[in-house]
Image (cartoon, rainbow, N blue to C red):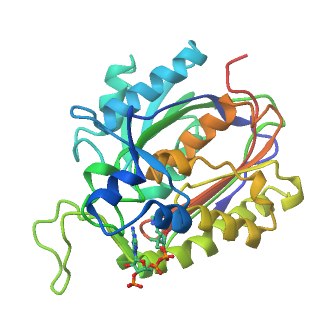
Amino acid sequence: MTAAPPSTAPALGILAVGAYAPEQVVPNAHYAQYLDTTDDWIVSRSGIRERRHASAGQTSSTLGVEAVRDLLKHAPEALDGVNVVICATSSPDAMFPSTAALIAGEVGLRGAPAFDVSVACSGFLYALSVGYSMIRAGLAKRALVVGTEVMSGVVDQNDRNTAILFGDGAGCVVLGEVPQGYGFQSFVLGADSAGGPHLYLRGAALQLPEGTEMGPHLTQNGREVFKFAVRKLGDSAEQAMQEAGLSTADIDWLVPHQANIRIIEAACERFGLPLSQAVVNLDRYGNTSAASIPLALNGAVRSGQIRKGDQLVLAGFGGGLSWGAAALKWWSPTLE
Ligand code: COA
C-alpha cells in the first residue's frame, strides 16, 4: 500500500521527539563469556558492539513513559492537544491493558483513546501511518506515537543466533500540523505471510495449528531475513521517495531500522545512497525492534545531524514479514 497526501491538505509532521534506553549496558563480551561466540564475530557480522537491557521492574510501558518524559524535557508543551496514544510494540507488558493505555495513564493523557500496534520491527512506521491517518480524518488533533520494547524478555539469552542482535529501548514522537512544505509526503506499507515462518514469536494461542511448533522465544532464520531485509529496505525507501515525487539525490538522511550494519550497507547500495547518509546507532543499541527508528531519529536530531528542512526517508522491516517506509521533510524537533 502506498499513499501520499492531497496537495491541498494541511501538512502533518513530527512536532517533538524523545527517547530512552535503560542504563544497563550489555557489551558483546558478556555473550562471549557463556556462548560460543566472540566480540569479533558479532561486530563483523552485525556491527553491534553493545545493547541495553531493562533492569528488574522495567517494562515496555515504563521505558515508553521515560521516552515521553524525555520528549517533554525538550518540548514541555508537546502533549497539549494530543488526543490519541498509539504504541508500537511486540513485547507489551500484557495483551491488555494495552501498553499505550498504561503509558497514557502515566503521562497525563488518561481518557484519550489508546491502543497498541503489533507489526514487529515495522511497527513504528505502521503506528505513524495510523496516527497520521486519524489526524487527517479529523479523528484526532495530535497523536502521541511510541515505539517501545523489552526484547531481552522475548529473546532466548542462550541462543547465540538471536540474543546478540536485540536490545531494549523506547522512542516517541508527537504528530500534528506543521507549516506547509514540511511533514510527511508519503507512506509505503506491506506484509507477506509467505515469509512469516522466517521470523516469529509465539502469542497467546493455547493450541497451534497441527504441524506447527513454536517455542516460547523469538525464532528466526537469519539468512532468509537478511535477504528479505536488504531487498525491502532499499525498495520500500525508493518507493516512498517516488510517491513523494523525489529521487535519491534529494535525500539528506535515511533513518533505517537498526538490525544489522550489513543490511543497511547493502540497502544503501541498492538505493544508491552513500552509507554516510544513513543514521546508524545499532553499534550502541542493537536491534530494538519497534523502538529502533524513533531511537535513531531522536539521536540524530539531538546531535544536530538532522536539521530543519532536511529530507528524510524512514524505512523498516520485520516479522510478518512486513515492511514500511515514509518520506518526511523535517520541520523542527520543538514546538515553535
Ligand atoms: N557467534 C558465532 N557464530 C554464530 C553466531 C554467533 N553469535 N550466530 C550464528 N553463528 C554461526 C551460524 O550458526 C553459522 O554456522 P554454520 O555455518 O556452522 O551453520 C555461521 O555463524 C554463519 O551463519 P550465517 O547465518 O551465514 O551468518 P550471517 O553472516 O548471515 O550472520 C546474522 C548471521 C543473524 C547476523 C544475519 O544473518 C542477520 O543479521 N540476519 C538478519 C536478522 C535480523 O535482522 N533479524 C531481525 C529482523 S527485524
Q: Residue furthest left?
A: 206
Q: Which residue lies furthest to the top in this view?
A: 76
Ligand 1, what quadrant? bottom left
Q: 113 or 311: which is nearer to us?
A: 311
Point out residue 302 in the picture as x, y percentages from the top left corner: 66, 28
Q: In this view, does 102 lie to the left or right of 125?
A: left
Q: In which quarter of the image is residue 86?
A: top left
Q: Is residue 247 left or right of residue 44?
A: right
Residue drawn at (50%, 22%), measured in percent from left and top? 70
Residue drawn at (26%, 50%), measured in percent from left and top? 153
Q: In this view, does 313 lie to the left or right of 26?
A: right
Q: Is residue 320 left or right of residue 135?
A: left
Point out residue 308 in the picture as x, y percentages from the top left corner: 80, 31
Q: In which quarter of the image is the N terminus?
A: bottom right
Q: In which quarter of the image is residue 301?
A: top right
Above or below for 148 versus 126: above
Point out residue 11 in the picture as x, y percentages from the top left corner: 74, 36
Number of numbered tags placed on the structure image: 0
Q: 55 or 234: which is nearer to us?
A: 55
Q: In which quarter of the image is residue 54?
A: top left
Q: In which quarter of the image is the C terminus?
A: top right
Above or below for 65 versus 45: above
Q: 148 or 138: which is nearer to us?
A: 148
Above or below for 192 versus 133: below
- Res 113 seen here: no
- Res 144 seen here: yes
Point out residue 74 in the picture as x, y percentages from the top left corner: 60, 17
Q: Residue furthest bottom?
A: 211
